[in-house]
Image (cartoon, helix red, strand yellow):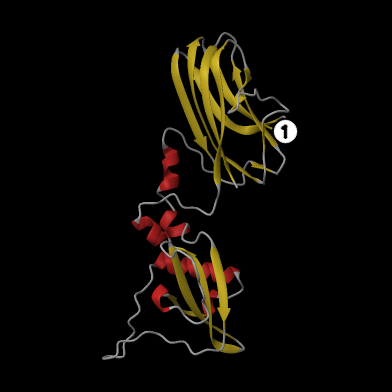
Amino acid sequence: MVKGKKGKSKLFAILGICAVILLITSVIITATGDEVEIPTNEMTGEDTQVPLPESVQNYVEEFVEKKGIDSESINNVTEIDFENLPKEVEIENVDNTNLAIYQINYDQPSSSNNKVFVITYSVEKLETQGDLIVSQDKREFLNFGFNGKMNSSGFLKTAVGVESSLEKGYVMIREGSITGLSTNLEVLEGNGNLEIILYKNGEQVQFGNSFIIDSAGIKKDYDIQSKDIVTFEAGDILSLYVKASDGISWKDVTTLLEITG
């Protein structure tokens, strides 16, 4: 589990992008039986291929291995020029700005010179455009809040102003995970504890924001966790509750719940 506060969530945007999120959506095309041509220098006969970054090479090999090709049988991985596509690959009406095609040559016990092509988004190309928010995961944010003053505990409202409850809240469209929660509120008076509690189908989930209240003023807290720790199914209802110690009064709550599918 990865859990952080006070800015540690920024790690999502920096760590693991180049090494992990290399392929977003991939299509694999298989071709067998043809001789493999490797570009060479006409004068020297030497291989003129530009080596792939190790992170790209490793991820492509891992991807095709999931498709049943043993990584140890791979003898060559190259990036294909869009201006000189192999006959096995036909792409029409596709913007290739962020696409990459990799040719993987491999051997099998029954034959040699087999090859497959992986058509995918390229992180290298996206990075040159300054777009580092790349992931095969779909992240969404559910807005909760409360506009006004409260002298006790209570449920937060949805973005359309409906107060959530054990039975009312956001209904999940597909399965996924709870991966983040952030809260900003103002404490008017009192001392003790204040918690933002997450409910799934009316049952408390062990993930939320918490505050130790010893003074009035603006408070904030944010927490993240890995996927598949707190999960939900399609049709599950998510709601949020503010639990405050006796004597604490608070107002103007803004809470974001991050879900990842």
**Nearer to us in this view, 227 or 126:** 126
In the picture, measured across the screen, residue 79 lies left or right of residue 176, that is left
Nearest the camera: 91 or 129? 91
Q: Residue furthest left?
A: 43
Question: Is residue 180 depicted above or below 106 in this figure?
Answer: above
Query: Which residue carries the number 1 mark?
Result: 201
Say few, some or many: other residues with alpha carbon within 10 Å of mark 1 (under 14 / 14 to 19 / 20 or more): some
Percent across and percent down for residue 126 are 40, 57
Q: Secondary structure at mark 1?
A: loop
Query: Residue 165, located in which quarter of the rendered image?
Result: top right
Q: Quadrant of residue 76?
A: bottom left
Type of amino acid at the residue the image marks with label 1: Asn
Residue at the (56%, 68%) spot, across then down: 27
Relative image position of residue 164 (x, y in whole percent): 66, 25
Residue 41 position, x and y percent, is: 30, 87
Q: Where is 153 relative to 134, above or below?
A: above
| On-image quarter of the N terminus | top right
In the drawing, does residue 109 fall left or right of residue 218?
A: right
Residue at 54%, 45% in the rendered image? 139
Q: Position of residue 30 (x, y in %)?
A: 57, 78
At x 35%, y 55%, the residue is 129
In the rendered view, does 58 fall on the left or right side of 64?
left
Reply above or below: 83 against 225: below
- The count of marks equals 1
Identify which residue is drawn at 60% across, 87% down: 109
